[in-house]
Amino acid sequence: MDSQQFYRITKALADPRRYEILSRIAKCRELACSDVRCDLPITAATLSHHIKELVNAGLVELRREGQFAHLKLRRKAWREYLSRLGKFKTAKF
């Protein structure tokens, strides 16, 4: 994982709502956007914005099927991010 992707993920997860959305996606193999929206008190436009940020960060894969969108956690990217984040724990500043 390069520094730029690490920064994009960190920035995306700085928003508590996006972290909550990512947590919901991670609990399933794949999750429909409509299911995410039913559980959260946000507009479709706001959800779309948050999903776009997670996709751009490389954390979420978006699959379209007709008018429906399905979300999946990119587990390899998530593991790489956590691994790199863990290195900060042992770094001396």
Image (cartoon, rainbow, N blue to C red):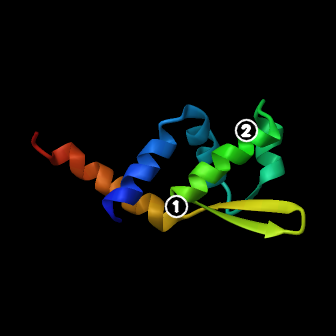
Q: On screen, 60 above or below 48?
A: below
Does residue 24 appear in the picture of this structure? no
Left or right: where 40 falls relative to 26: right
So how many labels did they put on this image? Answer: 2
Left or right: where 25 falls relative to 85: right
Which residue is disc 2 drawn over?
Answer: 46
Q: Position of residue 66 (x, y in %)?
A: 89, 68
Give the residue at x 56% y 40%. 19
Mark 2–mark 1 Cα distance, whole angstroms, equals 19 Å
Give the residue at x 56% y 57%. 56
Q: Position of residue 26 (x, y in %)?
A: 60, 53
Q: Secondary structure at mark 2?
A: helix
Q: Amino acid at mark 2?
A: Thr
Residue 58: mark = 1
Give the residue at x 61% y 35%. 17
**Quadrant of the rendering where the N terminus is positioned:** bottom left
Image quadrant in which you'd find residue 70: bottom right
Q: Are marks 2 and 1 in contact (CB under 8 Å)?
A: no
Q: Earlier in the sequence, mark 2 or mark 1?
A: 2
Q: Amino acid at mark 1?
A: Gly
Q: Position of residue 71 (x, y in %)?
A: 70, 59
Does residue 6 appear in the picture of this structure? yes
Q: Position of residue 2 (x, y in %)?
A: 33, 64
Q: Secondary structure at mark 1?
A: loop
Left or right: where 83 falls relative to 24: left
Residue 73: mark = none
Query: Which one is in front, 81 or 47?
Result: 47
Left or right: where 59 falls relative to 44: left
Q: Residue furthest top?
A: 41
Give the residue at x 46% y 63%. 77
For label 1, count other residues whose C-alpha is less than 10 Å away and answer few (under 14), some (14-19) or many (20+). some
Q: Residue furthest right?
A: 67
